[in-house]
Every structure is written in structure tokens, then in C-alpha cells.
Image (spheres, helix red, strand yellow):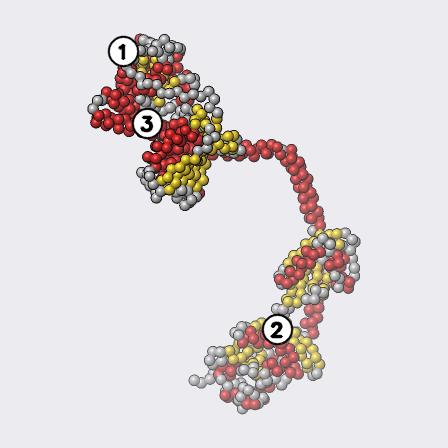
Amino acid sequence: MKSILPQPGAAGLPLPPGGNASAAWAHDWAATPLGPPEDWPQSLKTAASIVLGSNVPMFLAWGPELSVLHNDSYGEVLGDRRPALGKPLPEIWSDIWDQLDPLRAKVLSGETVFVEAAPRPRRRGGVAETIWVTSCYTPVRGEGGGIEGIFGVVAGISDESGEQRIRESEERFRLIADSAPVPMWVTRLDRKRSFVNRAYVDFLAISYEEAVDYDWRHIIHPEDGPRILAESLAGEASLETFMLEGRFRRGDGEWRWLRSISQPRWGPGGEHIGFIGVAHDITEWKLAEEAMLGANRTLQRSVTERTADLGAALAQLRAEQTERERAEEALRQAQKMEAVGRLTGGIAHDFNNLLTPVIGGLEMIVGRLDDPRLKRIAEAALESGRRGAKLTTQLLAFSRIQRLSMAPVAVNQVIGNLRQILAHTIGPDIDVRTVLDRVAGHALCDENQLENAILNLAINARDAMPDGGVLTISTAAVDEPGDAELAAGTYVRVSVADTGHGMTAEVAARATEPFFSTKPFGKGTGLGLAQVHGIAHQSGGTLRIDSRETAGTTVQILLPRVEPEGVTATPPGPRETRSDDGPVADILVVDDDADVRAFIAAALGDLGHRGAVAPSGQAALAALDEAVPDLMLVDFAMPDMNGAELAMAVRARHPDLPILFITGYAESGQIEQALGRSVMVLRKPFGIDELAQIIRAALPARIRR
């Protein structure tokens, strides 16, 4: 392929002699590392033609030794360093090569480097001078694509007139800095200042020469000195802009707050050469801040004094807050119990109405059967009915509307009576032990509910020990200091402990929630512990659970301890039977359930009484207009007019007429509100014996037999 460059002349260069390449044309290149021009690679010839054909000062350093080829214009930059053609670049600039070598490394690594107004020493005709050269250096690639040389272009040269401009620039900077109202300074790396402005000098109130060399550490407030010195050293070491703030003594002796900002300075080669800084007087701002802090301190003192005056009130408020939180928790629990209680109470009411004629009728049948087989069947059915009645009692106790018979109960005796039942209920794989404190005494509670609570806990313990274990029931009299759950006083503690699998903390925390159960579906209702919890609280006590996984569970029932003064046990009387002397009393039965009415009427006849029935309150009032009975048996939950409303209407007409309530819902509060706490209540379901005994107690003395 034919070259597009001009044909070489006698010296073999890619340009004709003359022009800006006269020195290069006259040079003997064969004696240099580059060799004769006709042997140069095309990339070198191309770069050489650019350098030699330009009037702008240019040079080319080629090969491992960076042999130099330059045009005549660049020769003026070299001055007395000529002749330089063919010589290595480090040799030509040997006196400042330590400054140029980093530039060489960057270019040979592939960078283009631009240097602005860099000082370069030059001698011309033996006279030394400094020029400021602005240059651009570019890598040149060879035939194989690698970097073979450096291409240099001098874009500008400043001589002594450039120094004059620099001095003029510095003078303008000084004039501007001196007109600034804030202190300014320029420091070198040795922390000596090379310049300070007029405000700096005025602050110190000394001469400029003294200010330039002044040790500012002498005027720092003693309280701020160590901190400012440490922050200054750290800021300088970071080579980033940093701020200092402290008190400095002005030349007139007054302490002033200054906030200084220092920024690093960089030289032409990117080297760090010192800092430039400015300071602002913030004394007024600090005084205002101090005044505000003083006002805040005054306010704080006032608040503190006020707080001291209100200390007792605040303590009371904390106590009330604690009590409120306890009450809110109790309210949440009560709301849950109320919601479920409405459901369970309604179910219990319907079950009690169903069970009343079932149990009573079976009792009447059992008493009349002579066939042993039929009698066993009837007795089994009667026992099932009584278990159903016990379930409704549990539901009512859980819903907290069951009317409790609160009395001093001998706890140890109750547990002793339960041993046989516990043995049959728990099974042979579990060792049942009792540890009864002889001085445990009596607890104020409902005896039947206490039995239910212990049985519930024992069954839970049995289920927690499927592979067997030890069940321990113990009692003790304990003194409690009182807390949010329990008033201070003496309590009887009934503990039921097992060696079963235990509960996690999360499960134990929810154990008393209604319907919460970890048992498989169909194996538990989730009412057991909720019922026990309700029984304990209704009695004025509480329930505590201590359980850990794999370490067993202990449940404690705490009940108020009382002395059984004046309490005597009433032995059960003999079963009432039919009188041979005719009816004992005229009794009006009021109940909206036809089966219940039929059973009670039959039972009254069996007991020798004469019974009349009414299906509603209005019907009962109409019957009273015809004849006044000796006693009224009134159901509470009836449509249109409930039992309490009927009783109040009857009392308005016949104040002395005895009224006995029969209820499956145990609405004792509403009944007592209507007729007083002395009102007699027979809970459904009931047997004939219970009916006979309470009728006997309710009848006027003139009719009793």
C-alpha cells in the first residue's frame, strides 16, 4: 500500500527539509536508539510527521528509553537543554524528573494528562529563568496496539510577565480579603501562616508581621483548649473541610465566641500544600442561646418546684393508673365472660328446663319400680340426667351467673371426700397423693364449686401425664401481702401439681381464656381452667399457674381463710312422701314450659299438695283473681313478663303471699333486686326431695306439717 505521507528527503524523514523541522532534518538519527527514519514503523512515522509538520511546540518520546523527537518550536521551550533530539526524556529533564516521572507513569498507563501553568526551569544563553508551561500529554500506540510513546503539546508559555500577573492576582486577593469583615488566613503545611487579612490582625491587635507568626493557642479559653486542639488535629489529618467552635481572647482582653471553617489547599500537581480558613464571631448568637438556656433553666426550676408540690398527687396518679390498668384488664375479661356467659346461660336455661322433668320423672319412676333390671336402667338414666345437671352447673359457674352458696368450707374435708372419686377418675397409672396442712382451716367459697374446681384441675393433670406420673393435691394457710390481683390477708391455698409435660409461657398466659384448649378436637371444651378462675375470683381469691415445658404444672387456688364461728352442719332430712291426711297446701305453678309444669304438678300431687298451673304471668294474675293459693312456684325466664315482674305485681296485690322462684338461669341479682335477698330460689334441674324440702321451708307456719 502506498504511503500518503510526503517522500523522505536525504535524511529519510517523512517531511522535506526546512520549516519547523530544520533541526530534526539535520540530525543523524541512525546514531540514536530510533535508528534511521526509513526503518521506523509506520506508527512512528505518522506521529513524527504530526510533530514536525506543526508550528505549535510539540515533542514525541518513543520507545523504551523515550527517545525524543521535537520540532523547532519546542526547542525554544528547551533552551540550553538542546541538543535534545534522540536523547531519552529523563536525561533531558533530569533536574526536575522527580516532578515529571508521575506524569510519565499516568500517560504510559493510558491516561491523557493536562498540566496548567507548571513552573519549568530554563536557561537561555547561560541566563536562568522560570517559565510557566501549560501542556497536554497523550499516549501513542504502536503497530501492535500497545503504548509505544508519549505525544506532548505545549499550549501556553508564561515568562516573567506571568509572575507579575500572579502577583497582581495575589494583590487583588489581599485587597478582597482585607475588605472582608471576618478574619481570614492561609497556612502552610508547617502550620505557619503565609497570609492573614486585616480583620485577623485587628482581632489580635498586633502588627501584621506578628500576626502571621502568632501562636493562636495562647488566646484559647482554658476550658475550650484541649477540645479545640484535638478537633483541629483530627480535622487537618482528614484533609477535608472542618469546623471549630470556641472562645478566643480578643486583643482588648474580651472573650469572643468564634466559629472557624478550614479547607485544604492543593498545589498544581494535586499535592496538599496547606489550609485556608475563615472565622465568624458568633458571640451574640451564643449569648442569645445562653439566655434561652437560662430561661429554660428557670422554667425547669419552676417545673421542678411544681413537680415537688405535686409529688404526692403524682404518686396517687400512678397508683390510680395501676389500678385502672388492672380494672381495664378485669373489664376485658368480664366482657369476654359476659359474651360467652350470655350463650352458656341461655343453653343452661334450656337444658335445665329439659332436665327438670327428666330427673324428677325418673326419680318418681325409680321409686315405683319393683323389677330390678328396669330399676337399674332407670337409675342409670337418672345418673346421666344428674351428670347433665352438673354440666349446666359448670356452664353457669363459667359464665359467672351461677348463684353461689358462700360459706366457710373445711377444705381438707372436701379433698378427703373426693379421694374415691379421684381414684376412679384419674386411673391406676397415676399416683394420687395428698399433703394436707392440719391448720389450713376453712375457706370462704361454694363447696360444690370447690369440688368442681379440684376435679377439673385433676382431670387436666391426668391429661398432661398420658404415660403416668404423680398427682399431688396439697393445702396450706398462707399470708399474702396483696397485689393487683389479690387483697392483703390470710388465704387457704389449694395446690394441684403434676409431673406432666407442662406448658410454654405463651400457653400458660392464655390458659384461663374461655374456650382456649391445647387438647385435640373433641377432647376438651376449654372451659375447665376458665371455670376454676371464675370460681376463685367470685370467692374473693385468685388463680396462679406455674408451669414449664417437660417440668410439670402447679395450679394454686387462693381462697379467703375464715373462722367457722356459729356454723353447724344440717344433716339431710328424710325424703318427703305422700301424706295420708290429704293435701297440705294449695300451690300455683307458673312456668312457660309445659313439660316442667306437668312434672311439678305431678310431683306436688305425689307430695300430697294440690297444684294449679299457669303458662304465663298474665295467666297467673288472672288465676289469683279467682283464688289465692298458699304458695306460688314461679319460673323466672318467661316471655312478656318475667318472674321478677310477676312477683312485684303479686306483692302489690297480696303482700304476704309466699313466692318461691324456680329458675334454670340463676338470675339471682334481678330476683333479689325485685324481692330482696331473703327470697327463696330453687335451681333447675331438681329432684322431688329438693322440691319437698324447699316447699316445706317456704310454706307459712300454719300450713306446715
Please state, as top left, top right, bottom left or bottom right, where the C terminus lies in the image.
top left
Q: Three-letter amino acid code at disc 3? A: Ala
Residues at marks 2 and 3, CA–CA distance in whole angstroms: 111 Å
Please state, as top left, top right, bottom left or bottom right, where the N terminus lies in the image.
bottom left
Residue at image coords 23%, 20%: 368
Q: Above or below — where is 293 with respect to 189?
A: above
Mark 3 is surrounded, within 10 Å at the Cα level, by few (under 14), some (14 to 19) or many (20 or more) other residues, namely many
Residue 580 numbered tag: 1
Q: Earlier in the sequence, mark 1 or mark 2?
A: 2
Tag in front: 1 or 3: 1
Q: Three-letter amino acid code at disc 1? A: Asp
**Does residue 84 appear anywhere in the picture?**
yes
Q: Above or below — where is 514 with respect to 95?
A: above
Q: Above or below — where is 504 with respect to 224?
A: above
Q: Above or below — where is 603 with respect to 519?
A: above
Instruction: Look at mark 2 in the image and give the residue it sits on.
Output: 134
Q: Nearer the viewer, residue 448 or 101?
A: 448
The location of residue 451, given as percent across then percent down, is 39, 30
